Image (spheres, rainbow, N blue to C red):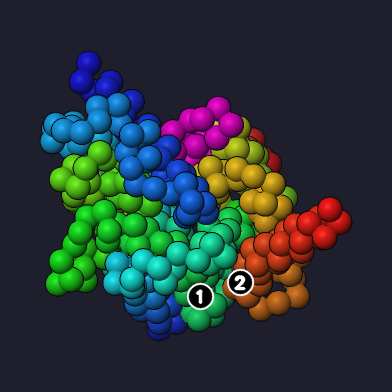
């Protein structure tokens, strides 16, 4: 991984994420209170998180693969259905993935 | 005894994180008075110690998950300094995970940062509520801004009055900031020490974190449809578009689903 590229990405993310936090505190309330803007803002993380979950579960680079991670993320989904705390959800995914890999999956 | 109670209120507060997302989705119900009466049993005059206890519960529970970030970031190939810089300066978990995931997947710095940025835009809507609730002086806002995230907002909005909200916000923010950065460092050091993080299943931590953040948001058919379309786009476009771009394109699922829903509503109204 190219170090300069990583630092550029970090710099942009630092600036962008700080600015959106600050903008929320500074703008007058009614600017962002329009229903369509609010609905879109609530739905945007849903789309991004779903795409990221799918990619990091089923892809390596640009190739689609089925490996031990699928079992791990399935375990995390089960933990979520059982309303487990956040750390248990992540722990379940890690343990099951490691277990399946150890068994040769 | 006290520990068990802290744990319980901590979990209740943690659930409120998803309520904040719900609130941004439905502004009509997002009235601060409703939230405070639903979020706390005590009502007005909640003791400061109770607020601090709730805030510590959330701060400690979520702060510890910095381990997962430190490990994931180091496993993705970022240096110790890069990993710690992200937790110190970005300080919004989902964006940090998204950035290191995109960089590990070979995305260029601009598409990688764009995905992280779009995930961070929800914090602007939290800031909007907090600036009214906490009644911040203008000069304090640049300093307070870094702590405007899911958890601090959830705790502050759950308090019955301004004093409690300010205490809740500050204690959650401070606890979370200190622990998140400490555990990021320890996680990254741990990952460097064990070498092959994938052998330990640690490459599954990232998607599990995303899923845990996503799950409470999937409340209605609209959210589930958006998530389904976005997941299909994210995977389907992976072989044909440059790395990092498919995630950005999949974000279009949000306006697309809203547009289709709006059109259907209009058609139903016209048919009546």
The extreme right residue here reads B271
Q: Residue A36 lies in what quarter of the image? A: bottom right
Q: Which residue is mark 2?
A: B248
Observer-nearest of A57 and B12: B12
- Quadrant into which the C terminus of chain A falls: top right
Residue B123 is at least partly visible in this image: no
For label 1, the residue is B114
**Residue range of the region highlighted in magenta in the rendering:** A80-99
Disc 1 is placed on an element classified as helix
- Examine the image and state in which quarter residue A77 appears: top right
In the picture, measured across the screen, residue A105 lies left or right of residue A40, that is right
In which chain is the residue bearing label 2?
B
Relative to A51, is B170 above or below? above
Give coordinates of residue B9: x percent, y percent: 31, 29
Q: Residue furthest front?
A: B272
Q: Residue at x 66, y 78 (%)?
A: B242
Circles 1 and 2 on the same chain: yes
Q: Which numbered disc flags the more N-terminal residue, 1 or 2? A: 1
B35 above or below B228?
A: above
Q: Residue at x 26, y 54 (%)?
A: B133
What residue lies at 55% left-to-right and 47% top-to-bottom? B217
> Could you tell me what secondary structure mostly forms the magenta stretch?
helix
Residue B142, position as x, y percentages in the image:
21, 71
Question: Measuring 65% from the left and 67% from the top, which residue is drawn there?
Answer: B255
Q: Is residue B112 visible?
A: yes
Tell me whether the residue at label 1 lies in contact with that at label 2, contact meaning CB atoms closer than 8 angstroms.
Answer: yes
Disc 2: CA contacts within 10 A as few (<14), some (14-19) or many (>=20): many
């Amino acid at each position: 991984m190219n170090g300069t590229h990583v630092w550029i990405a970090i710099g942009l993310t630092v600036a962008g994420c700080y600015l959106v936090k600050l903008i929320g505190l500074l703008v007058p309330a009614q600017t962002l209170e329009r229903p369509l803007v609010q609905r879109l803002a609530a739905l945007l993380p849903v789309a991004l998180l779903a795409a990221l979950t799918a990619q990091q579960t089923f892809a390596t680079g640009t190739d689609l693969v089925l490996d031990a991670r699928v079992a791990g993320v399935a375990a995390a989904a089960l933990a979520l259905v059982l309303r487990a705390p956040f750390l248990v959800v992540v722990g379940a995914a890690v343990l099951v993935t490691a277990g399946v890999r150890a068994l040769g999956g | 005894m006290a520990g068990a109670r802290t744990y319980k209120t901590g979990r209740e507060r943690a659930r409120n994180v998803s309520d904040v997302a719900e609130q941004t989705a439905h502004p009509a119900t997002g009235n601060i008075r409703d939230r405070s009466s639903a979020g706390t049993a005590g009502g007005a005059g909640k003791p400061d110690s109770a607020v601090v206890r709730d805030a510590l519960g959330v701060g400690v529970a979520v702060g510890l998950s910095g381990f997962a970030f430190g490990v994931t970031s180091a496993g993705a190939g970022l240096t110790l300094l890069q990993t710690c810089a992200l937790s110190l300066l970005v300080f919004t978990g989902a964006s940090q995970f998204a950035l290191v995931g995109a960089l590990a997947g070979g995305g260029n710095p601009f598409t990688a940062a764009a995905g992280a940025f779009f995930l961070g835009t929800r914090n602007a809507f939290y800031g909007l509520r907090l600036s009214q609730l906490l009644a911040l002086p203008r000069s304090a806002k640049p300093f307070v801004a870094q702590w405007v995230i899911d958890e601090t907002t959830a705790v502050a909005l759950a308090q019955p009055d301004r004093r409690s909200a300010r205490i809740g916000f500050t204690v959650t923010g401070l606890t979370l900031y200190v622990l998140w950065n400490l555990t990021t460092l320890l996680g990254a050091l741990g990952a460097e020490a064990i070498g092959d993080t994938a052998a330990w299943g640690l490459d599954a931590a990232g998607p599990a974190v995303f899923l845990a953040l996503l799950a409470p948001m999937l409340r209605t058919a609209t959210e589930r449809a958006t998530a389904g379309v976005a997941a299909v786009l994210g995977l389907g476009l992976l072989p044909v578009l440059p790395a990092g771009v498919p995630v950005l394109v999949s974000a279009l699922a949000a306006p697309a689903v809203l547009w289709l829903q709006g059109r259907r509503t209009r058609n139903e109204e016209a048919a009546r």
